[in-house]
Amino acid sequence: MIKGIGASEGIAIGKVFKYNKPELDIIKTPVQDIEKEILLLGLSIEKSIEELSGIRDAMEEAGDSEAADIFDAHIEILDDPGLKGAAGEKIKSDNANAAYAFSEACDKFAAAFESMDNEYFRERAADLKDIKSRVIMHIEGIKPVSLSSIKEEVIIVSKDLLPSDTAQIDKKLVKGFVTDAGGYTCHTAIMARSFGIPAVVGTKSAYENVNDGDLMVLDGFSGDVIVDPPESVKAEYRAKIEEYKTRSSALEEYRNKKTITKDGRHLEISANIGSAEEAEIAIKSGAEGIGLFRTEFLYMNRNSLPSEQEQFEAYKDVLEVMGERPVVIRTLDIGGDKKLDYLRLDDEMNPFLGNRALRFCLKHKDIFTTQLRALLRAGVYGNLHIMFPMVATIDELRDAKRMIKEIEVHLKEEGTEISETYKVGMMVEIPSSAMLADVFAKEVDFFSIGSNDLIQYTFAADRMNQDVSYLYQPCNPSLLRLISLVIEAAHKEGKWAGLCGEMAADPKAVPLLLGLGLDEFSMNASSILKVREALSNLNYEDMKKSAHKALYTESQEQVIKLINDELGIH
Ligand code: PEP
Ligand code: MG
């Protein structure tokens, strides 16, 4: 049996589909036969053009003319004698191998495109990165595997899945994920939960130990992965699937109810979403609002940044679907494990501590301005709450707020209609802002605690690293004290405090958060009914007492014992 972290509940039985992006290690190796190398280059370019034409035609047939245009641009660049000629020259003058020569030529062209004062050419620089790996894979004889080529029901097994990979999958065909890397709060795990697909992450070695087509049982509750199980084990897991279905249908009675504790205290449960389409699912799942729209997913699986109009339409859709209910839209939180290849950003030693989220947006004001304009325009259609991620200092918050005000003035001068009632809040996910919550509370309308990152930074434990996943401790008193500071600071200023990390749906943490006075819980739509049911069996007054005692314990272990003894939660 392979053991990992149960990251998304449910059980899957299915055939393995191995997926890994090949790493292209391009090394300069001198060649003897220059003619042969030039021929190899030419053939690889031809094969790439053939492949790209096929993709372009398929896109056109599917009615996606925008995507077809992108592949047309790739073909045009490859067809141009300039790039091929430059690579050929390098082979001749340097005795270089074809892969190295082509890589150098692409980098040179990309740098030249990038320095041009023209958006069309800057976008072509990003295309060159794709083109480069396609041609080099042909030169090296590496067969690309694509997630969009999946045509039957499978369980994906991968060393690592990036959110941009996960976003491409066909949710009807993919029955589960297994990844060697990752922890409970990595974004692939979060996405699996929001898609309702069982997942196990952090197995370390599953990829090496399975073959394409192997039959696999994946248990997203326990983190167990069994390859080629005997009939008796399959039968056992089929029974578990039935049991899970029965449990899920028993929760149906909570779908159209409010969330109320046994002693009558109401709390708000909202949904986390990553696309406009998920807003409908959120309502059907009983959400009272959207507590977190992760807008970075709008920027993924494409070759260039989304335009203001595209973003406006996505935000408007969500706001309209939700009507008067609050919709918290978080500004771009790129970086960490959420990469955008087309931005060609430098690799960082510690991407989670680097140029991500609000830091990135304040540096790339053009990208930020486009998003803020789209948000203010869309705000006319609903109850907009704009939220900044990863605020570390009060100056960052003030800079971001100033930008909103300036954009508001511009839009008004242009005569564009904008929201008059939008709210501005921030995520509290860096200990520096939690400690200074009293200062921040005076300058925002609301807080939403990002426990995934707040835990990562409080315990100095990378959320992607399975070896330190034991330090993901949502019930540790050190974290509870920080959270308590934030809630109290918000209430003192008459503001509300929510939480939108994975902790908001953790059955052990929820009573503690409610006991500490949290106002809003935002979670994957699929968790809402379970949390609603659990809270309907607990008294707020009991949770309050236990939560305040928990603040004065020494460890997560003691907190878990306390809530077991006092609230009967295990
Ligand atoms: C968080 O950090 O808790 C959060 C909700 O944001 P993300 O998981 O997208 O970093
Ligand atoms: Mg975060």
Image: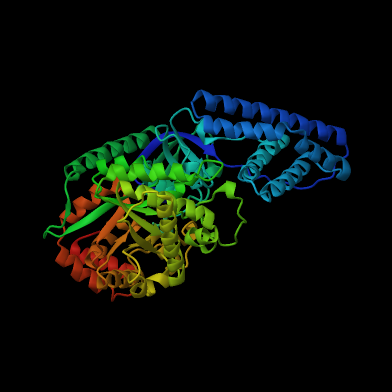
What residue is drawn where x is 68% and y is 40%?
A: 132
Vertical position of residue 383 compared to residue 541: above or below: above
Front one among 220 and 315: 315
Q: Quadrant of ligand 2?
A: bottom left
Any part of residue 196 in sight: no
> Residue extending furthest bottom?
552
Front one among 90 and 379: 379
Front one among 391 and 4: 391
Q: Is residue 433 left or right of residue 301?
A: left
Where, quadrant-wise, is the N terminus in this rendering?
top left
Any part of residue 569 in sight: yes
**Residue 138 image point, x, y percent:** 70, 34
> Residue extending furthest left?
263
Where, quadrant-wise, is the C terminus in this rendering?
bottom left
**Residue 219 image point, x, y percent:** 37, 44
Q: Quadrant of residue 239?
A: top left
